[in-house]
Amino acid sequence: MTTYKEIRGSQIEAVATDPSNPVEGQVWYNTTSNALKGQAATAAGAWASGGNMNNAKAALAAAGIYTAALAVGGEDASGLVAHNESYNGSSWTEVNNLNAARYGLAGGGTQTSAIAVGGANYPFTGATETWNGSNWTEVNDLNTARGDFGGAATDSTNSIVYGGRSNPSSSNVVADTETWNGTNWTEVNNMNTARKGLGGTGSSNTNALAYGGRPAPAETGSAVVESWNGTNWTEVNDLNQLRSHLGGAGTNTLALVFGGNDPGGSANIRANTEEWNGTNWTETTDLSTARYSLGGAGTQTNALAIGGAPIPSGGVKTEEWTGAGSGVTRTFTDS
């Protein structure tokens, strides 16, 4: 009979804590939890529950990665909030607030170098704030004040925002695109389709994806997707699901989108998740909790879905995405 050591070249280790970087096929016994564990690769992507936020909110901005994220601004049951929370991969901690409370803002970057742009502060604002890991600082405003729009950022010095609406009127929807160089906003080529409530993903002001949303005067969602190459927007293949106010993560060639609603309000809330490979969208595992106006951070393979409406049921929730082929630790049982 062949032994595990003969197959893998090593014995099953007994350890007090799980290995920090196990390889696929590695097996160990955790003496603290008295459990036999092993490292596997996921066959399909899946969502798992993460730590709840301290404050329920929707229409927020998010920045960072799977294990180091920010959730910024938004609205709760009582109105606009300036809350800023930091995620360490398991729990949220309240850190210094935005200078201006607002919802429907755009944002991005990292946990230590982020940007928060525009949003509704009654009326819509062009206010821009940058985050250095400790505090928010007001910097130069957008050229066009607006909210309910998409955006992408590398950090606080390199970002892009697009679409949205410039006043509360449903018909006042814009296609404007602006890029940020760390000092000023510059108007560049517009999107092909003006819309509000769209999702935004990307890694810099030369790499962005715009998806979904609601074009004026329609109040139903859109499946339109556009890709930005640093100069122009190009229409690419549509989402499988019509929706607006959805979350997303990744780049313009490898992205994940999730949640949203169609039409507006609380009707037809989506849990759908779709993956983008640079050419086509593929439906994959749904969110555990359907919600809209949620934040998204991370990559196509490791993402966070943060907060969202309806409040309070969706407002504190965090879900963590592990994509197909990613490493995952399994606990063996006798059943």
Image: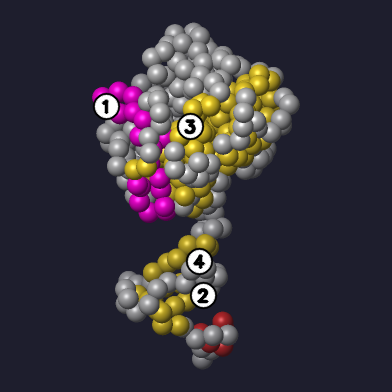
Lower sequence index among marks 4 and 1 = 4
Distance from Cα at disc 3 to Cα at disc 1: 27 Å
Q: Which mark is residue 77?
A: 1
Disc 3 from disc 4: Cα separation = 44 Å
Question: Few, some or many C-alpha atoms within 10 Å of disc 2 (few <14, some 14-19, many ≥20)?
Answer: some
Residue 48 placement (x, y as % from top left): 39, 51
Q: CA distance from mark 2 to mark 1?
A: 47 Å
* Residue 148 vertical placement versus 69 (above, below): above
Query: Which structural element holds mark 3?
Result: strand
Task: Give the amino acid at mark 1.
Answer: Ala
Residue 249 shows in the view: no
Give residue 99's quadrant in the image. top left
Does the stretch in magenta take in 22?
no
Q: Residue at x 66, y 21 (%)?
A: 186
Q: How far is disc 2 from disc 3 in space, using C-alphas?
A: 47 Å
How many residues crowd mark 3 within 10 Å: few (<14), some (14–19), many (20+)?
few
C-alpha separation, residue under disc 2 versus residue under disc 4: 8 Å
Q: Residue at x 52, y 68 (%)?
A: 21
Provide residue 132's location: percent of width, then percent of height: 50, 41
Q: Secondary structure at mark 4?
A: strand
Work out whether residue 236 or residue 197 is closer to the camera in this orientation and state it.
Answer: 197
Label number found at residue 26: 2
Question: Can you identify the residue that label 4 sits on?
Answer: 40
Q: Quadrant of the C terminus?
A: bottom left
Residue where numbered disc 3 is placed? 137
Q: Which residues are magenta?
A: 72-93
Could you tell me if the residues under marks 2 and 3 are in contact, i.e. CB atoms within 8 Å?
Answer: no
Name which residue type carries label 4.
Ala
